[in-house]
Amino acid sequence: MKNITFLSLTFLLILVASCGNVKDIQQAVYSGNYDRAINMTIEKIQKKRGKKSADPYVALLKEAYDKAVNRDLALIDKLSKDPNPEKWRQIYDTYLLLDTRQEKIKPLLPLTLIKQQQPVRFDFQDYTDRILDAKSHLVSHLYKKAKILLNSRNKADIRKAYDLLDELDRIDAGYKDVSQLMQQAHQRGMTYALVKITNETNKIIPKKLQDELLNFSSYGASNFWVDYHHKKQPGKQYDYTIDLKFKQINISPDQEREKEVLEEREIQDGYTYQKDANGNIVKDSLGNPIKIPRMIKVRSKVHLYQQYKEAQVMAQAEIKDNRTGQIIDRFPLQSKYVFEHNFATYTGDKRAIRNEYLNFLNERRIPFPTNEQMVYDAAQDIKMQFKDILNKANFL
C-alpha cells in the first residue's frame, strides 16, 4: 500500500473534495476535453495555491496534462507517416499547442500535494526545433501550392492562392516574395461591378440620396474581392452591373389630427384646522394645531394635436452578369419613415392635466417635412439593406 499509484491518489483526492467543480473537471478529462480541464484546474489552483483544498485540482491538472501530451504526440507520429504535405499544417499547430500548454503551467510550479507532501512533476520538453522544422515544411508547402494556383486563369483558384499566401504571411512574415504575390493575386482575383440607380416611380429621388448610395465608402459598403464603380472607367471591363431600381414611392398628405380631452382631478388646495365641538382648534401632543388637507375638484379641457406624415419606399437590387447577359439575382428592398409630432393647448386649471399630456403643452406646431426630405429619410433603411448586398456579394 505504500506504493500507491498516482491515478489511485487522484481518485482518493477527488472523493474527499467538494463535488461541484471537481466533478466538472473530471468529466472534461474523461471526455477527452483535456485543455478545458487544464484551464479550469489552473484557475482553481491560482485561487487555492498552498492550501490542502488545491490538492484535487493539482492531481487533475497532472492527469489532464499527461493525457493531452500523449494524445498530441501520438497524433504527430501518425501524421508524420502520411505522404500528403497537407499534414504539416496540423503538425505545426499541434506542436504550438504542446508548447503553449506547458507555458501555461510553468508559472504555477513547483506544485505539491500538500496533504501527502508529494511533489508533482511535469514532463516539459523544448519543442523549438520541432516547431521550426514543421513551420519550414508548412511554409514551403503553402508557397508551392499558391504558386501553382496563381498559374490558373480561374478567379476562384487565384483567390484560394491569396488565402494560402495570407496564411503563410501570418506564419512567416517577409517570406520570399509573398507580399508581391499577394498583391498580384488580389489584383487578378478582383471582380469589377458597375452600380447604377434607376427611378421607375413618378416621384423625385433626392440627389443627396443618390450621391450617398453611389458613394460606397460613405456608408461602409466594401468588399475585398469586388471593386464597385458608379461611373464607367475607360478601358475597364465590368463583370457585373448592379441596378438599384426604385419601384414605388408612396407619400401621405400632411395630416393634423385633433382630439379634445376633458380632465378632472381632486387635488389638495391648502388646509384647514381641526376644531372641537366648541369651535376651538385641536392640537396634537406637542401643542401643534392639527391640520386637515382641503381637497377641491379642478377641471381642464385639453386640445391634443398630432401632425402626421408617412413615406414608404420600395426598390429592387438587380444583378446582371455582363459576360452572359443574364440576370443572376434580385433582392427586394423596402423601408418606411413616419413623421409624427404632438402638441397641445388647454383651457381651465392646468393642475387637472395628467403628466402624459403636460409635455405636449410645451410644444408648438412645426412645419411638415417636404416630400423630398420624407423620401430621403425613408430610404435610409434601403441604403443599409443595399450595403449588406454589396458587402456579402460573392462575385467571380
Image (cartoon, rainbow, N blue to C red):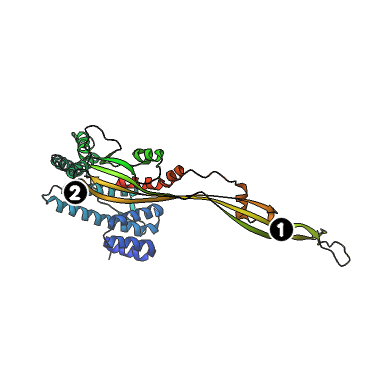
Quadrant in which the N terminus appears: bottom left
Question: What residue is shown at x 63% (from left), y 58% (from top)?
Answer: 261
Q: Earlier in the sequence, mark 1 or mark 2?
A: 2
Residue 29 locus on image (x, y percent): 29, 60
Task: Say left or right for 354 vs 336.
Answer: right
Question: What residue is shown at x 17% (from left), y 47% (from top)?
Answer: 88
Q: Residues within 10 Å of mark 1 (few under 14, many from 20)?
A: some
User: For mark 2, what is the residue?
Assistant: 91
For the view shown, which residue lies furthest in the top direction?
Answer: 234
Q: Which mark is residue 363?
A: none
Question: In which quadrant of the rendered view does residue 117 lie?
Answer: bottom left
- The answer to which of 275 and 374 lies nearer the viewer is 374
What secondary structure is marked by label 2? helix
User: For mark 1, what is the residue?
Assistant: 298
Question: What residue is shown at x 43% (from left), y 45% (from top)?
Answer: 375
What secondary structure is marked by label 1? strand
Quadrant in which the C terminus appears: top left
